[in-house]
Amino acid sequence: MNQQPNQEHSQSKFRSYIPSSESIPEFTIKTVIVGVIFGILFGAANTYLGLLVGITVSTSIPVAVMSVAFFRLTRNIFGPTNILEANMAQTIGSASSSLASGIIFTIPALFIWGMDPPLVQMAGLALAGGLIGVLFMIPLRKLLIKQEHGKLPYPEGTACAQVLIASDKGGSTAGNVFLGLGIGLLYKFATGFLQLWKDKVSIDLSFLGKSELGLRGTPALLGVGFILGPRISNIMVSGAAISWLILIPLIALFENSLVAPWFPDLATPISEMSVSSIWSNYIRYVGAGAVAFGGIITIIRSIPTMRKALGIGLKEFRVKLDRNPTNSENDNEIERTDRDLPLKPVGIGVLIILAALVAIPGLLGANASMTVRLVSVPIIAIFAFFFVTVSSRIVGLVGVSSNPTSGMTIVTLLGISTLFVLLGWTDDMGKATALMVGTVVCIASSIAGDTSQDLKTGYIVGATPSRQQIGELVGAATSALAVCAAVMLLDQSYEFGSTDLPAPQATLMKTIIEGVMETGIPWGLVIIGLSLAATAELFKIPSLPFAVGLYLPISSMTPIFFGGLIRHFVVRSSKNDKKVENSRVEKGILFSSGLIGGEGLLGVGIALYAFYVGKPGGLGIVWPDYLGEIVSVGIFGLLGYMLYKMTDKK
């Protein structure tokens, strides 16, 4: 166990931290329990974050760090724990976050339509997508993880492996995560439950017409900004500034030339609308067009990678299927660190899941007939295999956080919606079923990226792939119900599509389905969004983060901007010393991950309280005039200062 990991990039010279010849406990009861618990907790937190700002963060490293810390604290109870057990706990625990990403991109659209799905249906779709994503990725492991080692870096997987190795050698990095978790919990409890101060403040910019500048001072958004870094944070806030400081005043000015309300809100004149109402009724369509462009352009740019990845996937399937018992490798002859789950049960598992989607009424839409299901399921299989292969390779280059899952979902929805239009299935049943197809594909492609990163971590530390693959399946299966329950609670407490919980990605998917199946969306506004995103690309600005900023409230983008700004100052103060810079940034990311987890967990907890008891009324504190805004900004500033200082903590 004290062997140093070989740093050679060549696959033929690579030696894992734990050699293949050494067999130590890995898939144990305690690792499964800890992984499942952390998975449920971080899955719920990521659900809240994704519904708030439309993005989620990788939880592999925080889960790994917390698992190591937990096992150390309970050493006298559960006995000693080795690095492979800690890796198994993070493998199981991190699966929930990618599952949450797939769910929140689609399912909330049903709530916005007023077609609230039952919990069993949601959990069934999540389970199907999660299992398909893991199973489809298994045959790709040897090629993408092993043979492409040194070519595909898998950044989160490699970083997670280094954290586990450092912890195994005696290092300690858990303090920042736990402190961030505690601060996030306390902050959310003070603002969301006790309501000691407002977490959202705004300044009326009436000199621009109808406009305002807002700040939603929350730990989670500050942490997201630090993790994203200054460049992406700046781009996102720039998109928000264009929406709130330019487009909204222009729309308010334009209403002077109108004699009647403007579509899509034909009931209320723009002159009587608030700034947030103009954003809700008009700007979101501009943002939807921009996000759709950003997602599709990301897919187009990935076409060379997609073609290569799809070719690799098909080749790997053919090679495995062509093997027969006389020429195939004997399991006993395969090194421990190179054993995958056998292809035959993997294929049977996929067929059983697809058959269940056809056979179980109400799973793919409440009123979907057998004919509709028979048409839909082959499309799920084709798109899921294609995008699982693509996702598994793309994350190897750019990481899970940059995986264009939304773009893959958009392409799926455009395809299935167009087919349904040709078949005449354009009623509510058709819309709901199209969304369900997109849900399964979205979850499958999302969890495939996470599985790839986890298998890379395992490859470096010396885990057994087949056991990790079982761990991924366990993580997906055990977190499906919990994440879906969190979605239901959050809708009942905050309402999807509101400024409190915009559910931006799901709203976009809803708009796309309506745009294909109906004519009831303002295409002029959508085209404006497309044009703005295209202009950003012409100036070498990544259109997807720009579009997300354009789409979301500016109050959600400003704390992200400040988080990125803090990271800029952290890097700058490191004075070009890369070792110091990397150490400080890692500490900041761990603390930020804790902030996100803490606020997200209590956000779900408050939603649970509101469901059973009622919305918290707070202590009734009312700050006079602008004093409340000053207090809110001041406390948020202290939180930002704490984040900066945590990076310099010895």
Image (cartoon, rainbow, N blue to C red):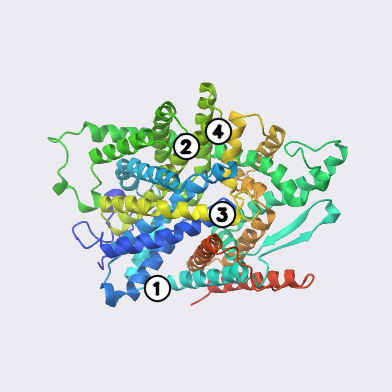
Mark 4 near mark 2, Cβ–Cβ under 8 Å? no
Give the label, 2 or 1, closer to the camera: 2
| Residue 313 appears in the rendering | no
Q: Position of residue 169 (x, y in %)?
A: 32, 71
- Return the residue nearer the eye: 107 or 634: 107
Disc number at residue 492?
Answer: 3
Residues under labels 4 and 1: Cα distance?
A: 54 Å
Q: Is 427 displayed left or right of 178 in the figure?
A: right
Residue that appears at 50% across and 25% down = 419
Q: Is 393 displayed left or right of 47 in the figure?
A: left
Give the mark, 3 or 2, whose residue is nearer the N terminus: 2
Residues under labels 2 and 1: Cα distance?
A: 50 Å
Residue at numbered disc 4:
428
Give the mark, 4 or 2, whose residue is nearer the N terminus: 2
The amino acid type found where label 1 is placed reads Ser
**Could you say whether the residue bearing mark 4 is in a helix, strand or loop?**
helix
Above or below, 363 relative to 173: above
The amino acid type found where label 4 is placed reads Asp
Residues under labels 4 and 3: Cα distance?
A: 22 Å
Above or below, 484 relative to 167: above
Q: Position of residue 342 (x, y in %)?
A: 23, 42
Give the mark, 4 or 3, whose residue is nearer the N terminus: 4
Residue at numbered disc 2:
366
**Could you say whether the residue bearing mark 3 is in a helix, strand or loop?**
helix
Above or below, 351 relative to 504: above
